[in-house]
């Protein structure tokens, strides 16, 4: 009886090892994807971190134009970290720390949120690796290709997108106007600005006579106060700025490249997010400003909306005008690494 049980036990062990070997062989050939292995929860043993299979490696090489095997492995490991995070699969914390230490400081700041592994941050890390290989490639295109490749390797993770950028993507613009001594203080005012003498004097100017020297402080004031209650009975700063029309172009780009995050966003935490609550808008993005831009002529509005969408500021799409060029622009960003604009 004992011998029979021993033989059965040995048979079971051999069968398990055989199944693992077959599964391992299929996975290396790209036949079994993550989440479909019969040996659930043991990938750390069956496949080391970053072993994505031949089909996945070929996708990385062709989609991301990676020729060096070491570059492929570096990106594959980061893809695997993101995927395991999305699927709540085990990751060796020691190996993860080694990987995190190899990231640049800005990228490293986004790898964790509330001490938890943050999958989009690791995909941004992967894009950073690809950018190192292709330093002359446009940053948005690198991120788009990286996320496209990730979705090809892990099609069930299609909802994972990159976090929005803090500042506006590169866009051509001229020198912003200087700040006049009379108007410099406007940018530091709060909701009491409607009673300021210099502000009131601007309300009395015809649109064509509004001074360029007030543009930058007024934009600072707009971004600072747009989340605050609208003053009763006064002309709001966005109404005043609307009278400038697209004369604001250079000053607006300057503001979105230089503007500090609003006070409502809170101080940055170690993971790059506020300690108390998440901001409703990223970095220098201003819904009120894009509401104004949406009324500008296409020649001025389209470049700024394009740059905003390249920055992941998808919320701006709600301010696009009802026109053919706006619909075409949204269509271009259907495969955005930040998600398709609504």
Image (cartoon, rainbow, N blue to C red):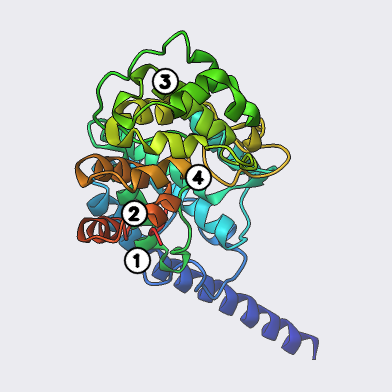
Q: Nearer the viewer, mark 4 or mark 3?
A: 3
Res 165 seen here: no
Measured Cα–Cα span from mark 3 to mark 2: 26 Å
Side of 106 relative to 6 (left or right): left
Q: Position of residue 160 (x, y in %)?
A: 48, 58
Which dot marks residue 214?
Answer: 3
Q: Helix, strand, or loop for circle 4?
A: helix
Q: Which quarter of the figure has residue 277?
A: top right
Which dot marks residue 122?
Answer: 4
Res 150 seen here: yes
Q: Nearer the viewer, residue 205 or 23?
A: 205
How packed mark 1 is, by other alpha carbons closer than 10 Å (few <14, some 14-19, many 20 or more), is: some
Q: Helix, strand, or loop for circle 3?
A: helix
**Residue under pointer 2:** 320
How packed mark 4 is, by other alpha carbons closer than 10 Å (few <14, some 14-19, many 20 or more), is: many
Measured Cα–Cα span from mark 4 to mark 2: 31 Å
Q: Position of residue 339 (x, y in %)?
A: 41, 57
As drawn, which residue projects farthest toward the bottom?
Answer: 1
Q: Nearer the viewer, residue 142 or 207?
A: 207
**Residue under pointer 1:** 29
CB under 8 Å between discs 3 and 1: no
First in sequence: mark 4 vs mark 2: 4
């Amino acid at each position: 009886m004992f011998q029979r049980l021993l033989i059965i036990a040995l048979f079971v062990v051999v069968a398990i090892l055989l199944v693992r070997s077959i599964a391992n062989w299929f996975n290396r050939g790209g036949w079994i994807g993550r989440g479909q292995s019969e040996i659930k929860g043991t990938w750390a043993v069956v496949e080391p971190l970053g072993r994505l299979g031949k089909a996945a490696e070929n996708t990385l090489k062709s989609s991301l134009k990676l020729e060096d095997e070491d570059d492929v492995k570096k990106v594959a490991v980061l893809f695997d970290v993101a995927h395991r995070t999305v699927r709540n699969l085990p990751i060796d914390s020691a190996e993860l720390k080694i990987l995190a230490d190899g990231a640049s400081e800005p990228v490293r700041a986004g790898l964790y949120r509330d001490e938890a592994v943050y999958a989009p941050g690791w995909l941004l890390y992967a894009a950073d690796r690809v950018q190192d290989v292709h330093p002359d490639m446009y940053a948005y295109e690198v991120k788009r290709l990286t996320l496209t490749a990730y979705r090809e390797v892990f099609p069930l993770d299609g909802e994972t997108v990159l976090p929005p950028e803090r500042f506006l993507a590169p866009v051509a613009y001229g020198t912003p106007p200087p700040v006049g001594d009379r108007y410099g203080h406007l940018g530091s005012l709060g909701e009491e600005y409607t009673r300021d003498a210099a502000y009131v004097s601007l309300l009395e100017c015809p649109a064509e006579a509004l001074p360029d020297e007030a543009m930058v402080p007024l934009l600072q004031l707009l971004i600072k106060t747009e989340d605050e209650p609208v003053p009763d009975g006064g002309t709001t700063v966005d109404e005043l700025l609307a009278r400038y029309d697209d004369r604001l172009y250079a000053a607006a780009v300057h503001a979105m490249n230089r503007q500090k995050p609003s006070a409502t966003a809170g101080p940055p935490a170690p993971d790059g997010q506020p300690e108390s609550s998440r901001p409703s808008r990223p970095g220098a993005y201003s819904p009120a400003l894009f509401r104004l831009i949406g009324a500008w002529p296409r020649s001025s509005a389209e470049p700024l909306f394009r740059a905003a969408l390249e920055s992941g500021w998808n919320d701006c799409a709600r301010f696009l005008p009802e026109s053919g060029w706006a619909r075409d622009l949204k269509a271009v960003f259907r495969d955005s690494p930040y998600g398709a604009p609504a």
